Amino acid sequence: MAVFRLIIALTLFWTCVLGQVIHVGSGHRRATKPNVVFILTDDQDKEMDSLQYMQTVRSELIEKGTLFDHHYCTVALCCPSRVNLLTGRMAHNTKVTGLKLPFGGYDKFTSQILNDKWIAPWMQKAGYKTYYTGKFMNDHSQKNWNKPRPGGLDGTYNYLQPWFQKNNNPPRMEEGYATDLLAEKSYEFIDEGAKSGKPFFIMIAPVAPHSNLAGGGKEGDSEDAGCDDNGLSTLSRGEGNAPISAERHKSLFPNVRVPRTDNFNPSRPSGASWIRNLPRQSVENVEYNDLYYRRRLQALQAVDDLVKGTIQRLKQNGVLDNTYIIYSTDNGFHIGQHRLQPGKH
């Protein structure tokens, strides 16, 4: 199944995928190299209209920028997709095809001698200060964060109590909501980059709207939300790993449902191969999927706040007019289409 990757993006440096959006500050362009801020969400959909619920992304990036809505994700899985984006190479060339060894993860990335062959080292060689905040790639953890440390970066940084690692300091857990913590660290990097006297490249990678994997869950055990390893609903067992929003957004969109397109939980089988054999979802299952969809939209509101704060901080530093803002996601998502449970097959 082809999955859209959301991108509001810049093809000047490399080609990416949700539809992409690029925004350049208004006013006269300075003669210096432009700054680049790349915001990368996790598992955000395009076809289920998630962008319609992000006011700042729509008003400041899409309406004032450019939306590239025909970019496709070749491997709809976090790690290989991120490596594809960061290196500009397809998975059959990077050999990163899964989430953890032997097929993927950070150790696979470094074993393929890719640590100096991705966007950060290239930008450094072009004279940029480079920063990365948020999720890097799967299996980059407390155990291997410096084995080796990600190359080409001047600075690096579960929804609740996330772990952060900065520069050469070991990782530590921080209290607070992950996206809000990430926003504050991103603003600090913008301040530092603006004062450096060099153009800067900052990548901001919130975990939203990925499913919540706190409490011992590991991505890759079952990437789909609300279903077991056979793709069947786990609701009867009281399970579920819907995203978690910031407290201020928990009551939003109370009546919103997954768009009821023709391929949503159809009465007759659709799709091909094993998808045609999926059972139709029960009323209970559909109700959970609508709840899961709302949780995703709620989790994205803090990302929208982050985008707003990023624009404000660039403006405060006087560099907005010379900055490209790129917004994208690593891969798309489905909820109920062709009777599929939440996931990204």
Image: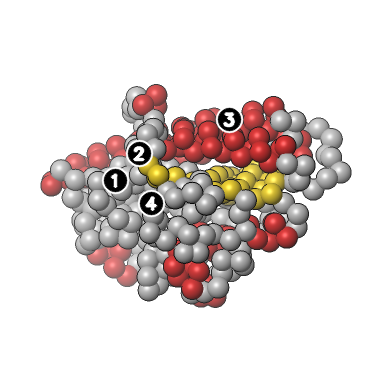
The spot of residue 174 in percent (x, y) is: 39, 38
Q: Identify which residue is drawn at 79% across, 48% down.
A: 33
Residue on which disc 2 sits: 161
Q: Is residue 133 visible?
A: yes
Which residue occupies the foreground of this view, 131 or 154?
A: 154
**Crowd class of label 2 (few under 14; some 14 to 19; many from 20; radius 10 Å):** some
Q: CA distance from mark 1 to mark 4?
A: 22 Å
Q: Are marks 4 and 3 in contact (CB under 8 Å)?
A: no
The answer to which of marks 2 and 3 sits earlier in the sequence is 2
- Inspect the image, locate mark 4, and give the three-letter code of the amino acid beneath it: His
Q: Quadrant of residue 228?
A: bottom left
Disc 1, SS: loop
Q: Is residue 105 above or below residue 22?
A: below
Disc 4, SS: loop
Q: Is residue 13 above or below residue 287?
A: below
Q: Is residue 304 above or below residue 137?
A: above
For this view, does 60 lie left or right of residue 146? right
The spot of residue 263 in percent (x, y) is: 37, 52
Which residue occupies the foreground of this view, 277 or 223?
A: 223
**Crowd class of label 3 (few under 14; some 14 to 19; many from 20; radius 10 Å):** some
Residue on which disc 4 sits: 334
The answer to which of marks 1 and 3 sits earlier in the sequence is 1
Q: Are marks 2 and 4 in contact (CB under 8 Å)?
A: no
Q: Are marks 2 and 1 in contact (CB under 8 Å)?
A: yes
Residue on which disc 3 sits: 309
The answer to which of marks 2 and 1 sits earlier in the sequence is 2
